[in-house]
Amino acid sequence: MPVIECDVEEARATLEAAGATITGGNTDHERWRAEYGDASAVAYDEKVVVQGARPADIEALLREGSGRAHCYFDGASRGNPGPAAIGWVVVTSDGIVAEGGERIGNATNNQAEYEALLRVLEVAVDYGYDEVEIRGDSELIVKQVRGEYDTNDPTLREKRVTVRELLSNFDSWAISHVPREINERADELANEALDEA
């Protein structure tokens, strides 16, 4: 549950401008409540607490953007194709900024890897980062995005195009293959999501 220390009236104005639904607080300590996307927020004195299925929906609006982020992604599929899930983590010099894991229905492992990459890039774009260093443990996906490998699979080709479109939002980007142990948190999030029945 992210806690954002900020001017809560400025935060309210930002959320209102983005189209969030704002209501009064439920207790004497709550200044206001907001609903936006798959997230909700409660404002107290000098801080906003964000909750919901996708806290990044609100958090990205309220945190200051720019700078560099490290983005980790992982996809998991049981059956290939079979039940699939994704995990992703955004890290800056301040630590983990956002992370998530969710089921995505049935997919191949490579489709799940691409979905995880797309999700972490969407979050990084929402947060307004200028530069991203992307890391994943799928050598195939990394080399396809870099243009070193091609793909005959139309689904993967389409996902690669979408990834490249998202990457155009950044001043600079790099993607590299890392061992699974370096990508451990994203892997855990994907597998935890798969294990949830």
Image: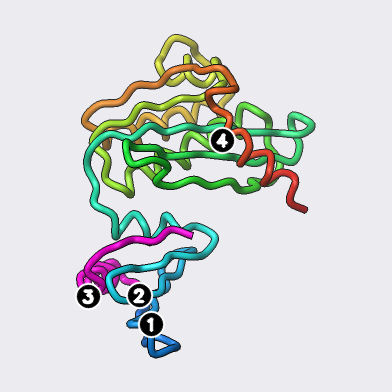
Q: Position of residue 53 (x, y in %)?
A: 54, 60
Give the amino acid at mark 3.
Glu
Of callouts 4 and 3, which one flags the residue occurring earlier in the amino acid sequence? 3
Residue annotated with mark 1:
30
Q: Are marks 1 and 3 in contact (CB under 8 Å)?
A: no
Q: Position of residue 145 (x, y in %)?
A: 43, 21
Image: 195 above or below 78: below
Residue annotated with mark 3:
9
Q: Which residues are magenta?
A: 1-20
Q: Are marks 1 and 4 in contact (CB under 8 Å)?
A: no
Residue annotated with mark 2:
43
Note whether residue 155 is visible.
no
User: In terms of depth relative to the viewer, which is nearer, 7 or 114?
Assistant: 7
Q: Is residue 102 left or right of residue 124?
A: right
Q: Secondary structure at mark 3?
A: helix
Note whether residue 132 is visible.
yes
Within 10 Å of disc 1 (Cα), the crowding (few <14, some 14-19, many 20+) is some
Image: 66 above or below 144: below
Q: Secondary structure at mark 1?
A: loop
Give the amino acid at mark 2.
Ala
Q: Secondary structure at mark 4?
A: helix
Q: Position of residue 195 (x, y in %)?
A: 75, 45
